[in-house]
Amino acid sequence: MRTLRTVPRHIFLILFSLLMIYPVIWWIGASLKKTSEMASSALWPETPMWENYTKGWAFSSEYSFTTFYANTLMMEFWNVLGGVFTAALVAYGFARLNFKFRGFWFAILLMTLMLPTQVTIVPQYILYNNFGFVDSYVPLVLPHFFGGGAFFVFLLVQFIRGIPKDLDEAAKIDGASVYGIFFRIILPLIKPALVTVGIFTFIWAWDDFFAQVLYLSSMSKFTVGLALRSFIDQFEVQWGQLLAMSLLSVLPSAIIFFLAQKHFVEGITTTGLKG
Amino acid sequence: MASTTSLELEKPSMWKKKKKNNYSTNLAGYVFISPWLVGFLLLTLWPIGQSLYLSFTDYPLLTDPVWVGADNYKKIFTDDPLFMKSLGVTFSFVFFAVPLRLFFSLMVAMILIKATRGMNLYRTAIYFPSLIGASVAVAALWRNIFGLDGYVNEVLSWFGIIGKGWVSNPDTALGTLVLLNTWQFGSAMVIFLAGLKQIPAELYESSSVDGASKFRQFFTITLPMLSPVMFFNLILSVIGSFQMFTAAYIITNKGGPINSTYMYAVFLYEKAFKHYQMGYASALAWILLAIVAIVTALNFFASKYWVYYENDGGADK
């Protein structure tokens, strides 16, 4: 009885999933096609052009995608490290400690969530330019060490507020300082939320094309995204190679998502995001 | 109180429980928030002030800024067709993209909230497009699928419809960007899912006993209970859409064809970092800030009439 009733739901979900994922499936096939086959409706090419991957990876005589991945992953390492740790610090301060003007600063923090990045981008650029940081990774990494972004602080504050205060009190009676409570009690308890923050940081920084195109100009420093962009700039776009390399560029985010999928949705759900 | 902002998610009483502020707790508080505070002062507050100042100057980056009064603003409003064009494009994008995205994400969240076998698989398939984000990769994909020889036209030709270059046609280019934005509704959906999970099941049970239909339940229980989350999503989607950049920069090649996708962020970017008119670009940024602030304020104002807060009384449990 029960299973029969769910059949229409399953049919709908299967169709809908296919619709959503179809461009991606087409993408996999197209990454193996010749340029002349690109428009054909066949999902799979007659003869897979694996050299789309090898030639695409080789990129130019000077630099290959090995360089670009190394650059991007190094940036991601610092971004995630800085973002997760400092967001946790700041969130703990807002969620658990009483200090003067806390409400005021928290309101400011929430307001920055709504601030268009364009308003600060020109002076920031000038600032980095004055310090000689343009065409380096400093402007891409440094902001993550300042609390990792208002959204993440907000997410973690919600999460920490969900932790019973008794735990803090008990630790306090045992003589722990606020710093001790943070490192021994709070930090281990908010791991699922920290995983969510880490994943989001990784994916968003990977996709943050605006900052990358703004601050990086020499090819030796290119991220994967910038290298893909220069594919399009070529006179005759090598679609096969471009799609092949694009597909590869999605893999890191996809792998991380699959590995941590459980955390991903639950990390948000348990934060009690609600009015 | 709660109606001031849905983003203050905690009841205010929590904040004022302990009133004694002494030196060491003050210090500890500021130590913990210092990373954010330093970043805010250095990379947000100072640049905001600086950009306000620069918006009244002529500043080609290589020489010092020269004060020109309100000239930049005057020129923007009276003598810059690209400003009006990009503003129009951006507003139509926001107007179509935000409701579509919210509608789809809510509908799909409603379906995904019910536990079904294989749910993880569906969820992954549906979330996957959002995972790849507004990256260069997906822009390349989109350009190809909606190109003249692209996949979409191939499918249309089965039905005898002769397609066109969707991306290269000024009438449809913006539509493909709206579609992309809708396809990637995942982050809004996840937030809806989180909100749906928090609606107490008793509400549905008791109304079922009273004989309410599923349809009726959606409008009398789900929507009101979900309205704060809807509001949160709305605010963030609107602000995000106003700043849409990557897709317009890459898919339609810097706002083409014939500027039909010339989003405001692309306009501002080109003024600042292609023509190096930093003063002019700063003025554009401040106008954007004003627009976003007004739209957000209107949303907050309107929210009084449709956002329902549980702790405002009513069905307090």
Image (cartoon, grey):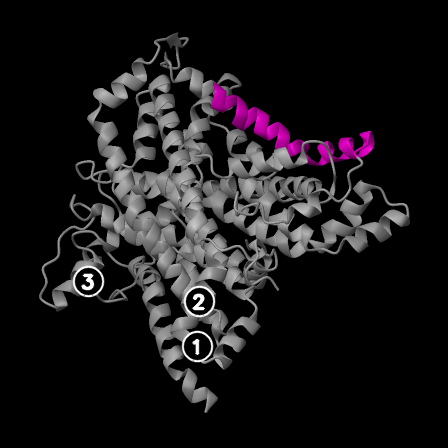
Residue contact at pointers 1 and 3, CB within 8 angstroms:
no
Q: CA distance from mark 1 to mark 3?
A: 51 Å
Q: Residue at x 51, y 39 (%)?
A: A113
Residue contact at pointers 2 and 3, CB within 8 angstroms:
no
**Residue under label 3:** A40
- Same chain check for tags 2 and 3: no
Q: Quadrant of residue B29?
A: top right
- Which chain is disc 3 placed on? A
B253 over B68 or under it: above or below: below
Q: Quadrant of residue B92?
A: top left
Q: Tag 2, which secondary structure?
A: helix
Q: Residue furthest bottom?
A: A1
Asked if residue B117 can be seen in this view, the reply is no
Q: CA distance from mark 1 to mark 2?
A: 9 Å
Q: Is residue B43 magenta?
A: yes
A20 over B179 or under it: above or below: below
Q: Is residue A267 magenta?
A: no
> Which residues lie in the magenta part?
B21-49
Three-letter amino acid code at disc 1? Ala
Which mark identifies residue B220?
A: 2
Q: Which residue is nearer to you in this view: B248 or A74?
A: B248
- Same chain check for tags 1 and 2: yes
Q: CA distance from mark 2 to mark 3?
A: 49 Å
Residue contact at pointers 1 and 2, CB within 8 angstroms:
yes
Magenta region, main secondary structure: helix
**Residue under label 1:** B212
Left or right: A116 with respect to B10?
A: left
Q: Residue at x 72, y 55 (%)?
A: A163
Three-letter amino acid code at disc 2? Thr
In percent of width and height, residue B195 lies at 52, 60
